[in-house]
Amino acid sequence: MAGRFGRPGTAMSSAGVRATSRALGALAGIALASGVGSAHVEYLEDEEAGVDPWFVVEALSDPFAAALVGGSGLLVLGAALAALRFRPFERDVAVFRSAIREYADLLPWLLRLGFGLPMVGAGFTGYYFNPIATPVLVGDPIARLLQILVGFLLLFGLATRAAALFGLAVYLASVPARPGLLVSFEYVPGFLAIAVLGPGRPSADQVLARMAAAEGTVYGEIDPVQRLAVGTRRYLAPYEAIVPTVVRIGTGLTFVGLGVGEKLLRPEPALATVDRYDLTSVVPLAPELWVLGAGLTEAALGLALLVGAFTRASALVAIGVFTLTLFALPDDPVLAHIGLFSLASALLITGGGPYSLDRYLGATDDPEPTVRGHEPV
């Protein structure tokens, strides 16, 4: 019996598989091609650029560009409808979800690495959260030391929640004076997720918690924070279920900001990047079409993540886009992108979580997300 969206049980015609596979393959190709010019172009081009609200209109005035963009949009819609209608590779998808969910207990570690490494890199390299920002609240040497400290605390999983909350507070307090920090908005969902989930395993906090809880240990007698840690853990435990939602929305906002704010409204740095790396020789398209494709791809990925539509597929495409960008643009600062990589990887594990379109449409069989095996501090 057909279910939601006419889902025909577990059976599917070979023609449906082929049609859906072609659509998804073409969609992935377009997304990856656009992704060569994606990511944080302001990390590569530091020239000042004004807002150009007519860039999209002017770019689409070319009939070829309009046809390509319109055809890509129809392909996206067709692939989405085909996936909902035919549910291709249903068994493969179910096994993948089951396998990837087994890494849920390592989610805190993944996020700690994803944001600890960029903080350490920022401190040693001399920039402030991202390569286009400079310290505002404290002197340069102190800012560098604080970033290194926060980064190492996250990497080792020591005072994890305090380090994440401190990093978040400094970032948010610096944004009004350094709007360029909004380019790296991924720090907000990243720090929030770490603060809620705690250190996970392996971590110094977990080892110290085990020592403090064991009977007869000297450390258990002198440890000053474990009672507070236990209370904090119990207080935050109910909020673990919405961590996927926080990560998804924060990642979606970052992608929308990169696509719209950094490319479609301010195309000059992206156009300069296309020219600098001679990307038109890779795919013979006009520079404006390169930038338009990159901006629309990122904006579309961001919107899909914001509403939680095809979350894992969108996360996979996002990882592919950034990976291709890092190989295609050799000067792109790798450390500055690790946070987004970790957020996208986290969404592969968790799926869209609560309040997602995937869950509303019944397009996922994910249980309520849980993170086991960690002792948050």
Image (tube, rainbow, N blue to C red):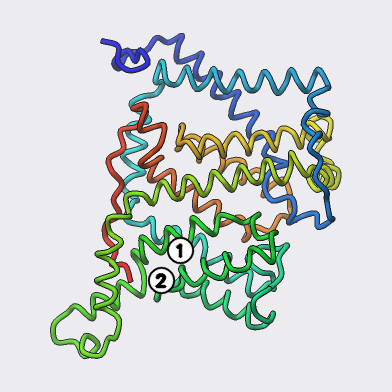
Residue 45: assigned label: none
Query: Who comes first in sequence, dot 2 or dot 1?
Result: 1
Q: Is residue 286 left or right of residue 333?
A: right
Query: Does the CB distance between marks 2 and 1 fall below 8 Å?
Result: yes
- Residue type at tag 1: Arg
Of discs 2 and 1, which sits in the foreground? 2
Give coordinates of residue 138: x percent, y percent.
65, 80
Instruction: Tell me where residue 227 sits by quadrant.
Output: bottom left
Q: How many marks?
A: 2
Q: Residue at x 30, y 17 (%)?
A: 10
Separation of marks 2 and 1 at Cα, in angstroms: 8 Å
- Image location of residue 142, percent across then percent down: 63, 83
Q: Which residue is the site of mark 2?
A: 160
Q: What residue is at 56 percent from the left and 70 percent from the top?
A: 170
Q: Which residue is mark 1?
A: 112
Q: Is residue 182 left or right of residue 156?
A: right
Q: Where on the picture, by quarter, is residue 11?
A: top left
Residue at (41, 71) in percent of width and height: 160
Q: Residues within 10 Å of mark 2 (few under 14, many from 20)?
A: many
In the rendered image, residue 377, in percent from the top left (x then y), is placed at: 33, 71
Q: Position of residue 123 (x, y in %)?
A: 63, 74
Q: Nearer the viewer, residue 360 or 159?
A: 360
- Residues 329 and 346: in front is 346
Residue 4 located left or right of residue 269: left
Three-letter amino acid code at the position of disc 2 = Thr
Quadrant of the drawing holding the N terminus: top left
Q: Is residue 135 above or below residue 254?
A: below
For label 1, the SS is: helix
Seen in the picture, residue 335 relative to 312 is either above or below; the reply is below
